Amino acid sequence: MEKAVINSIMPGVELIYVHTDKFKTGHLSVNLLLQLDKSSAAKNALIMHVLRRGCKRLPDLKSISDELDRLYGATIDPVVRTIGEIQCVGFSSNFADDRYLPGEESILEKVVSLTAELLLDPATRGGLLKADYVRSERDNLCDAIRSEMSDKRTYSFMRLKEIMFSGEAYGTDRNGSLKSAERIAQIALTKHYKAILATAPIKIFYCGGADLERITEAVLNAFSTLPRGEIDLSAGTEIRVECGEPRFVTETMDVTQGKLTMGFRLGEVMYSPDYASIAVFNAVFGGGVTSKLFMNVRERMSLCYYASSVTDRFKGVMFVISGVEFDKYETARDEILAQLRACAEGDISEGELSSAISSLVNSVRAMEDSVSSLDAYYLAHSIDGLTYSPSEYALLIGEITREDVVRVAKSVRLDCVYFLRGEEKEVAE
């Protein structure tokens, strides 16, 4: 698989191009980059779902579905994701590669054009996004947010982020809050849509067998009517290296299993971050089935039903997510911190290090077998200004030493601990 080529093709528009003959399909995503903010996150998340309901030429889901069927089962779906404190919203398209179509059939240009139509030429009434589409998709968004809140594992993580990042954009969920979603109205959403379309930086990702010139021409033709004003380049992620004394928050709810979620700052390593070292550290500490958290806290000591860690290198943070018995909260919390100290003190066996590296290398190389993984990988890396391929990243991971892992572990600082436990039951006399 070739290395990505990144070109600026229009004002505020970058094309990320990855050529490969590995897949039978082509993949295209169009991503608007917006600052994650509690006042606009729900509107940003809602817009793409409303636009997907219809455009002027194909004004409803039935006509769009029929058109996609004619394009050999192509798909175009709304996408809402966050990279650090940047909210990325847009469309993701998958379609058959021309090599596998009968005769001289070609659909790439048609799929690119339809994706642009949905984004740029929505079905409207009186110049506004259709009120029934807005209402329907707003209800769906509210249901999705409620669903997340009803999953107590997800809810606990969301609450930790709200508390830990109360003064930072990172505390906002990618779909926004239920309260803000419920208030979205047709006129306000239409104005917001027009504003972000004209000002948001856009990254278009393509992976497939078409050559660079062809996909560039297809995008330029399809997006020729894209309105461009003064591009807002301010979207970014604030990294806080320092943190004060750890905060400990316990809340009660009708749950049968405690949810212990811990938030950490990666610390001074973020002044000059080595992402491969951070990834290997996380794998050693809690990122897999050979990690210290899994082998010790979960398996050997049986303190948690599950326990794992995940890092967000864009924000410079790490989270530990676990499920515990109510009365094992303090013991589990202290042992998780003890395993972190063990990493910082160099108590890492050759087996732990080699297993972590091997697992990570396999995971990173597996990205090249999935167009959606490649999309997420290159979009995130392009925001960071990085260009190395997954294979090159895997080589960097393979060179990480125990000393590299220790350096990261020593830098990590506990910021916030959130524990969701069951409500006290009254004892009958």
Image (spheres, rainbow, N blue to C red):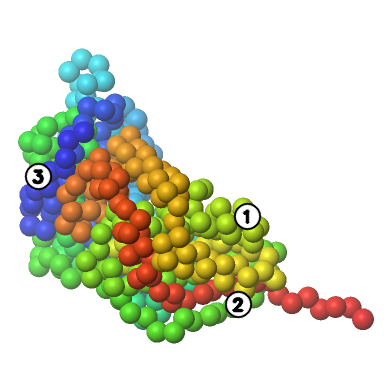
Query: Which residue ends up furthest to the right in the rendered image?
Result: 429
The residues tagged by marks 3 and 2 sit, at their Cα atoms, a distance apart of: 53 Å
Residue 240 location, x and y as percent? 30, 76
**Closest to the observer: 126 or 281?**
281
Asked which quadrant contains residue 428, the reply is bottom right
Earlier residue among tags 2 and 1:
2
Identity, as a three-letter code, of the amino acid under mark 1: Arg
Location of residue 106 (image quadrant): top left
Within the image, what quadrant is residue 93 found in? top left
Q: Residue at x 56, y 62 (%)?
A: 322
Quadrant of the drawing holding the N terminus: top left
Tag 3 residue: 220
For marks 3 and 2 on the same chain, the one whose residue lies earlier in the sequence: 3
User: Which mark is in front, 3 or 2?
Assistant: 2
Secondary structure found at label 2: strand
Identity of the residue drawn at 34% across and 64% down? 408
> In this rendering, would 337 be left or right of 65?
right
Residue, disc 1? 300
Name the amino acid type tagged 2: Glu
Q: Mark on residue 251?
A: 2
Observer able to see residue 116: no
Of residues 171 and 291, the one nearer the viewer is 291
Residue at 51 percent across and 69 percent down: it is: 337
User: Is 28 or 159 nearer to us in this picture?
Assistant: 159
* Front of the two marks 3 and 1: 1
Q: Residues within 10 Å of mark 3 (few under 14, many from 20)?
A: some
